[in-house]
Image: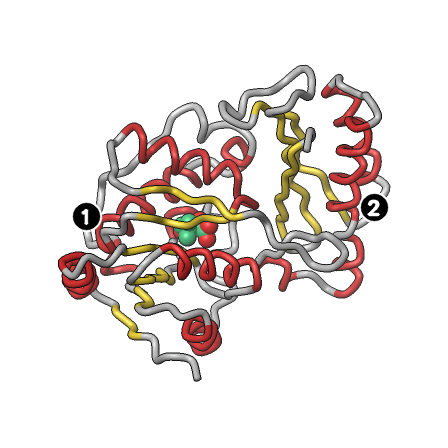
Amino acid sequence: MPQMTRVVTSISEMRAASFEARSKGKTVVLVPTMGCLHDGHRALLKKGRAEGGLLVMSLFVNPSQFGPAEDFASYPRDLDRDLKIASEEGVDIVFAPDAGEMYPPGFSTWVEVEGLSNRLCGASRPGHFRGVATVVLKLFNAVQPQKAVFGLKDFQQFRIIERMVRDLDLPVEVIGVETVREPDGLAMSSRNSYLTPDERMAARAIPDSLRAAREAVGAGVQESRKIVEKVKKIIEGEPLAVLEYIKVCDGESLEDSEEASSGSVLFLAVRIGKARLIDNTKLVQ
Ligand code: PAF
């Protein structure tokens, strides 16, 4: 029988619960989410549950990380289902503030992680990572976790949060969890729900292309240009897919790499119908 999960909406109540747990020697673990939970989130929650005493899942569709022409209004929301999943995964507290609690009138302070935030998704989504870094810092301040768990599908986001934690001396251990995939390899994402059946079929080109890239590197191809060409051919062979970017980058600095090496990661973003899907793979396993 899953336990009942407590829902907290105010920052002051969240902090009080966290201080109480910490005063009893419990480790507070945060799993930040925007809801619409899927098996990828379940993996984050399982990791969080294994890591600590008080497991907090935040549920907040953060307006500041969406551009004006993006899907903030239509982003899928299903609170009852999310609460059920949270309770099944042993979450102690769901922290679900409203936008007014997180962004009071006159809000004007932002966190910019320079450099890392401008490339890859940052180039096509100006301001996105400023919104992410700011809300994650605010969530850390509200929840006061010693540990926080993030998915590695959003690899650039993960590196940005690690850098923010390092640069601002935040006392939080940032933990990454491998991407959870559908049986055909498509990375789980809340935005997969936008895909029609035909578009869902077309989306298989993404994991297929990542596999082809890994195979090419395994067969001795090192030049990034040639790896990118291979991926491009597979994505462009799918009429419903519109390629936004493919890049081979250093997995730490996220700077472009001329050649694939042990630290290289291939990143891509593809639009299929209303969905903008991102994925990545290490090239040398
Ligand atoms: O990865 C997400 O779901 C969001 O970017 C996050 C980290 C919850 C911040 O809004």
Residue highlighted by disc 2: 238
Among the 4 quarters of the image, the one containing residue 222 = top right
- x and y percent of residue 125 in the render? 50, 38
Quarter occupied by residue 168? top left
* Percent coordinates x, y for residue 240 in the rendering: 79, 50
Residue 160 in view (yes/no): yes
Instruction: Check contact, mark 2 vs mark 1: CB within 8 A.
Output: no
Identify residue type, mark 2. Glu
Q: Vertically, is 99 above or below 149?
A: below
Q: Which residue is mark 1?
A: 106
The residue depicted at 38 percent of the width and 42 percent of the height is: 174
Can you give x and y, in whole percent of width and height, for residue 72 in the image? 46, 57
Q: Secondary structure at mark 1?
A: loop
Q: Residues within 10 Å of mark 1 (few under 14, many from 20)?
A: few
Left or right for 169, reference 149: left
Please name whichever residue, 162 or 73, is drawn nearer the observer in this view of the structure.
Answer: 162
| Earlier residue among tags 2 and 1 | 1
